[in-house]
Image: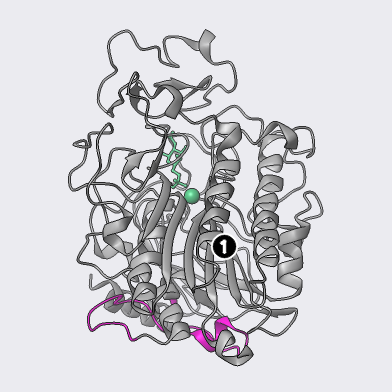
Amino acid sequence: MASAQAQKPNIILLVADDLGYGDLSCYGTQLVHTPVTDSLAAHGLRFTNMHACASTSTPSRYGMLTGEYPFRRSGTNVAAGNAGTIIRPEQTTVADLMRAAGYATAAIGKWHLGLRNETGRQDWNDTLDVTPRDLGFDYHYIMAATADRVPCVYIEQGRVSQHDPDAPISVSYQQNFEGEPTGRDNPELLTKLRPSHGHDQSIVNGISRIGYMKGGGRALWRDEDIADSIVAHACGFIERHSSEPFFMYLCTNDVHVPRMPHERFRGLSEMGLRGEAILQFDWTVDQLCRTLRRLGLDEQTLILITSDNGPVLDDGYADRAEELCGTHRPWGPWRGAKYSAFEGGSAVPFIAYWPGGIGQGGVTDALCSLIDVPATLAQLVGVSVPHGAAPDSQQHLSTWLGRDRKPRPWAVSMAANRLVTLRTQRYKYIAPSKGGPMITWGPKIETGNAPVPQLYDLSTDVHEDHNVAAEHELLTKRMQSLLQTITGQ
Ligand code: NG6
Ligand code: CA
């Protein structure tokens, strides 16, 4: 019985938003404490070389759920809140694969992959077609995009949750609705946070956002309660499916902007709101673990904890993340951050915890990529990936469960400007690109752009300081041509 259970565990893929490699105490920071996540790492496996498919959310999640690199598909840049579906229903997702293995499936929390067929054509007061239900998820309770984008409501099973018939919802990313205040024109209404760049359109809960919305009434979220709502729906799903295998794609809003954690976390971190959002993330992990234990599911549940992209401090709100950061390094040892082609854009924390299937307390530096989520989880649950599905996803189960340390031969990631980079276990290659060295529209982050080829030897130069392309001409050429073969460009 125990071994049968060990073969088919429940799976929780817990994806934080903008949580950096260096933001968890099990990855070395002393300045914020994440004891629950740390204890999963201590009793499971901690990865020091996991890469997201991109250094922003939409393309990163697209790759992770479909097993197709986001650069193969146009329309995979950061999506608006009224974007049409980015994953097409005929594509095979990891949820389809889990469903084929008899799993109950759910998507809970941040979605950011579009809804309905066409951008801007949603009727938010009616049932939406083309939702996660059409992409393999039996159940969903999601935020359409991000907390900083309208509409500021949850969608449950295709309908706005707690929809308020007295406050019908309209959304536009083009123009404001007559008479509705904005952050730009009505800064006096910004009672909770002010923008530092962008984010000056509709105001909800005393915070201005990207995009315009009207209505919502009691369906509007209160940012302070987002983590609680996500946790309640995640734990509810676990309870309802405690006697059958389940797969839950669970995405926190933490630690994305606007950072507005629940009042009970206020004052608990010297780093202010960003630090408190990290504490709230750890609380989320704790609530999940408690629910699993209470239901006797701890042994037979694989929890994977990761993030969609690298970290950022000032991402558009004056929340003092930069001033209060002190000596904390959210990106860990890497250069660059969210948006960047340097490692800090795509190197993410990754912890695998499964008492019934993973030995205790390991650390692995094997090169891995989240593009392998569909194929590797299919391998775990014993379903085959249909021909042509998840085309870029590979099976690396033995590495993911710590049974060996075999690295992926290479990993590619896409920066915010769609520049694709190539990593091997030892080297990193960045193709020559136009564009300046710094992001110009807000955050103070290095893009990783340079007019010349860049090659870094990560075995001695984790921080990508010394471009050795000129000394290793042949290797640079080989990596360049491998990257061209992979991207088909
Ligand atoms: C940027 C937003 C940023 C964040 C990001 C997406 C501005 C000025 N900045 O355009 O705040 O929302 O998009 O983040 O609008 S992600 O993690 O979802 O990719
Ligand atoms: Ca993100």
Considering only vertical position in the picture, is 284 above or below 486? above
Q: Mark 1 is on which residue type?
A: Thr
> At x 54% / y 80%, what residue is drawn?
425
Residue 26 in sight? yes
Camera-side residue of 244 and 305: 244
Left/right placement of residue 198 relative to residue 238 reads left
Which type of secondary structure does the marked residue at label 1 adopt? strand
In x, y percent, where is residue 391? 29, 77
In x, y percent, where is residue 149? 41, 34
- Quadrant position of residue 304: bottom right
> At x 41% / y 71%, what residue is drawn?
371
Camera-side residue of 178 and 404: 178
Q: Is residue 388 magenta?
A: yes
Badge 1 local density, few (<14 within 10 Å), some, or many (20+)? many
> At x 53% / y 45%, what residue is drawn?
253
Considering only vertical position in the picture, is 342 above or below 207? below
Q: Which residues are magenta?
A: 384-411
Tag 1 residue: 306
Q: Is residue 227 magenta?
A: no
Left/right placement of residue 405 relative to residue 430 reads right
> CB at mark 1 closer than 8 A to ligand 2?
no
Camera-side residue of 469 and 239: 239
- Quadrant position of residue 24: bottom right
The quadrant of the picture occupied by the N terminus is bottom right
> At x 71% / y 68%, what residue is drawn?
40
